[in-house]
Image (cartoon, rainbow, N blue to C red):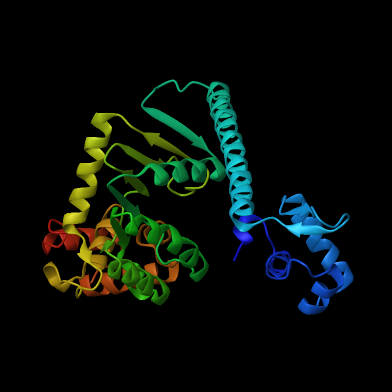
Amino acid sequence: MLAVLGLDTTAEAVYRAMLAHPQAGVEALAAHLGLSAAQMREALDLLSRLSLLRPSYEHAGELRAVSPDIGMEILMSRQQAELASQQQRVEASRAAAAQLIAEYADLRPAAPHPEIEQLVGLDRIRERLAVLTRDMRAEVMTFAPDGGHSPESIEAARPLDRSLLERGILMRTVYLESVRNNQPTTAYVGWLAEHGAQVRTTPALPTRLIIVDRTTAVIPVNSDDSAAGAVVLTGQGTLTALCSLFEHVWSLAQPLGSPTTRLVGGLNPQEATVIRLLAEGLTDDAIAKRLGVSPRTSRRLATDLMERLGARSRFEAGARAAQQGWLPDIR
């Protein structure tokens, strides 16, 4: 009960017993409480350090408990002094932290363009993203072109996602169509939707992209290796263009829970994208990466489409697709 004031359970019991039985000796109190001599000494030492014991005015060498009205005032005054000291230490730490932050900022090389910040390496990228997440105020828009997530990465992301959603942050994410075939990812995005996030899918995405509060964007330097480096963009014109790109892709993407639509020629959005990429001359591996699927799946999709078109080469497939009106209506 009095632990918040510095008394442990044993010392509190001894203090209460001494108040209730002021004439009892130490041995009698120990026997009454079922304490050993060592436990009794420790309790008396603590009570003495807290100024809750005083010498007896009548019997030399004996101790008496200080009355509760005085004793509790002593403990609360001591606690107030400790709190004041702690507050002083906090303020000193805050000042030291501010100085360190300022010194670190001075050590960083000045960016050649103030609206472009270069981040090299995964550690630096994650540090910057952590700061952006902490300072986020309204919304975050994301392109997630990596396909399905592993169960480990999903569990690692949940606490942060929950925190953002509980803060009222609007989260909109566009995933690749291929995540519909990844059960852990579909379960995860379903959980996101239940907690207020909005999720859509599209067959292909131009790059990984994170836009925070429409004022800051983070994109990888190399789409094939997003951990190698990234740039943070804050220019108004650049952000306007990137926000427009996101809104355009978002408007064409489909909510994850909705059925897959069919386009011209009975193609689904993923097949239509494969036709377009074939016409552009991309290899099976390049198409696989754009779709977030395996090269084997990419080859199967390409082969099936070429058979449907009656084409013997990719060039012929592109030409026949254009003749049949498939290409103009593809996203």
- Position of 90 with respect to 305 (left or right) is right
Q: Residue at x 35, y 47 (%)?
A: 209
**In-front residue for pair 284/228:** 228
**In-front residue for pair 261/284:** 261
Q: How many marks?
A: 0
Is residue 112 visible in the rendered image? The answer is: yes
Q: Residue furthest front?
A: 58
Q: Residue at x 39, y 57 (%)?
A: 163
Is residue 281 visible in the rendered image? The answer is: no
Quadrant of the image occupied by residue 313: bottom left
Q: Position of residue 152 (x, y in %)?
A: 52, 67
Q: Quadrant of the N terminus?
A: bottom right
Q: Residue at x 62, y 58 (%)?
A: 68
Q: Quadrant of the C terminus?
A: bottom left
Up/down of 118 relative to 285, above or below: above
**In-front residue for pair 134/228:** 134
**In-front residue for pair 238/70:** 70
Q: Position of residue 147 (x, y in %)?
A: 39, 63
- Position of 324 with respect to 15 (left or right) is left
Q: Position of residue 275 (x, y in %)?
A: 25, 62
Q: Residue at x 79, y 52 (%)?
A: 57
Quadrant of the image occupied by residue 315: bottom left
Q: Position of residue 130 (x, y in %)?
A: 46, 45
- Position of 110 with respect to 166 (left or right) is right
